[in-house]
Image: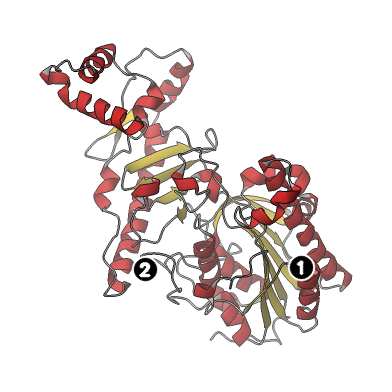
């Protein structure tokens, strides 16, 4: 264990406020629900390019606590973390901190049992007053480290507020306001006890929700593929030693544990993390990685959810799944609805060759095409993200294959998929079904034999008709 010298450092407290199911998209959609968070942001360092490591709460918490994104990768689903790196709160407890994990939930079930070895015992309640009282008791001993998780904004937990809401939007906005109210009360307690100057306060989002804009997915809102709207989440650091402002550098959930340790004086320990690094250091992240499943978890084709990994830089996100590659310009397309690779062919040497749409495009497209053909910026972005993501997935595959339980089947992603573009939705996107094909398909549906050169396409069309039926 890394030593801590009280002679050299003053033991600062740590409070982590988990913004459950709150991404930047939600923060922008319901600004009136977050007065206390906005007030905190004005006096804190705000990371505008923080990308969560996962679209799943438990995977995100594991990434936060252990400072890496491989803790669950060898299993075929959510499991107990492997302990590749000691959990942040275990390390603090061993260093003499009073640690606690406080949860506000309407559920009576045991919370986060699979993460129990990484967390302090989870204290949960459906009474905010009781939670605030417990927090006050935790702050009576110093130094303290407290993690606060309000589960109310989670879509399942939201059911408890449903009788008081007039619409789905009202329900979502109301749950955000409940979280913000709790945040304000926690900050008030620290302020009233004159503890803020000696406390590092972190607020971060674990994931957002996707209201079926990429398919119904069996009804799931998160845990689906890591589209930008799900993994682009707030990160706010309030610390007396950190100037307030906006930081546009990339940040990842795996960076938070080493950053917390650095802020409270454990700089040597912060340097020991392999996947994450302290945001206070000189290293600048060029790519942030996200995932929805573990590296050894199979697809869920029955609900149209694929294991998927993403790499994001300051403007684009590249995703890979069993369907192939998808590239999104998330600043222009924050919902990730236009796979830019639909406009290209991927050549054997890894370069992109633009393909003109079958229909003559409107003049609006001329400028876009000029930028793609006239310089190699998109090619460089794609190549860099593809290389980084392929190396990342290869490391995960190797780890999962080496560490999986002997009874677990090997179910890692085929690296050959980095040579394949996901063409799902291509025809719908361009709306370019050829009249001859449409006529042939109609003849086939009504019993007329197809010609040889269109038989394959017609079989696909008939299969689609059968699915729709």
In the structure shown, which secondary structural element does the residue marked by tag 1 occupy? loop
Q: Which residue is mark 2?
A: 75
Q: On screen, 376 above or below 418?
A: above
Q: Position of residue 400 (x, y in %)?
A: 32, 67
Residue toward you, 125 or 99: 125
Q: Residue furthest left?
A: 452
Q: On screen, 19 above or below 139?
A: above
Q: Position of residue 88 (x, y in %)?
A: 57, 75
Residue 40 found in image quarter? bottom right
Image point (30%, 27%), residue name: 465
Task: Looking at the image, tell me whether mark 2 or mark 1 is earlier in sequence order.
Answer: 2
Q: Decide if residue 299 is on the left or right side of residue 103.
A: left
Instruction: Indicate how the structure is coloured in the image.
Output: secondary structure
Q: Which residue is mark 1?
A: 127
Q: Quadrant of the C terminus?
A: top left
Q: Is residue 271 visible?
A: no
Q: Is residue 151 visible?
A: yes
Tell me the crowding category of disc 1: few under 14, some 14 to 19, or many 20 or more residues within 10 angstroms, Cα based: few
Residue 357 found in image quarter? top left
Tell me the crowding category of disc 2: few under 14, some 14 to 19, or many 20 or more residues within 10 angstroms, Cα based: many
Q: Decide if residue 92 is on the left or right side of residue 184.
A: left
Residue depth check, mark 2 versus mark 1: number of the one nearer the observer: 1
Image point (68%, 53%), residue name: 46
Q: Position of residue 48 (x, y in %)?
A: 63, 48
| Dot 2 and dot 1 residues touching (CB under 8 Å) | no
């Amino acid at each position: 264990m890394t030593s801590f010298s009280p002679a050299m450092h003053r033991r600062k407290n740590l409070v982590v406020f988990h913004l459950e199911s709150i991404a930047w998209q939600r923060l922008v959609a319901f600004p009136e629900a977050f007065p206390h968070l906005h007030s905190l942001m004005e006096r804190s360092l705000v990371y505008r390019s923080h990308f969560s490591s996962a679209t799943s709460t438990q995977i995100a918490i594991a990434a936060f606590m252990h400072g890496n994104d491989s803790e669950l990768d060898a299993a075929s689903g959510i499991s107990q973390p492997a302990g590749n790196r000691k959990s942040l709160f275990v390390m603090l407890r061993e260093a003499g901190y009073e640690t606690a994990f406080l949860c506000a939930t309407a559920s009576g079930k045991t919370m986060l049992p699979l993460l129990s070895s990484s967390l302090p015992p989870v204290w949960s309640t459906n009474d905010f007053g009781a939670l605030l009282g417990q927090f006050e008791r935790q702050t009576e001993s110093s130094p303290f480290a407290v993690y606060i998780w309000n589960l109310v904004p989670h879509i399942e937990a939201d059911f408890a507020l449903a009788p008081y809401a007039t619409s789905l939007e009202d329900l979502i906005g109301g749950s955000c306001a409940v979280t913000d109210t709790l945040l304000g009360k926690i900050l008030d307690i620290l302020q009233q006890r004159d503890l803020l100057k000696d406390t590092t306060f972190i607020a971060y989002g674990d994931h957002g929700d996707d209201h079926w804009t990429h398919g119904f997915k069996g009804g799931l809102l998160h845990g689906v593929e890591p589209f930008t709207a799900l993994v682009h989440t707030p990160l706010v650091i309030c610390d007396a030693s950190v100037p307030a402002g906006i930081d546009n550098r990339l940040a990842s959930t795996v960076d938070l544990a080493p950053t917390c340790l650095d802020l409270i004086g454990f700089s040597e320990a912060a340097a020991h993390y392999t996947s994450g690094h302290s945001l206070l250091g000189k290293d600048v992240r060029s790519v942030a990685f996200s995932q929805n499943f573990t590296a050894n978890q199979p697809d869920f084709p029955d609900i149209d959810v694929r294991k998927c990994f993403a790499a994001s830089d300051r403007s684009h996100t590249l995703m890979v799944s069993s369907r192939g590659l998808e590239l999104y310009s998330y600043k222009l397309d924050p919902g990730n609805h236009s796979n830019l690779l639909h406009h290209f062919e991927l050549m054997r040497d890894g370069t992109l060759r633009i393909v003109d749409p079958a229909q003559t495009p409107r003049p609006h497209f001329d400028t876009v095409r000029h930028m793609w053909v006239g310089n190699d910026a998109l090619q460089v972005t794609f190549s860099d993200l593809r290389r980084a993501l392929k190396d990342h997935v290869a490391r995960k595959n190797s780890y999962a294959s080496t560490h999986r339980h002997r009874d677990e089947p090997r179910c890692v992603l085929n690296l050959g998929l980095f040579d394949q573009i996901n063409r799902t939705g291509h025809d719908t996107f361009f709306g370019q079904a050829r009249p001859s094909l449409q006529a042939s398909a109609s003849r086939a549906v009504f019993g007329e034999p197809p010609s040889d050169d269109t038989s394959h396409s017609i079989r696909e069309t008939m299969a689609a008709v059968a699915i729709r039926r």
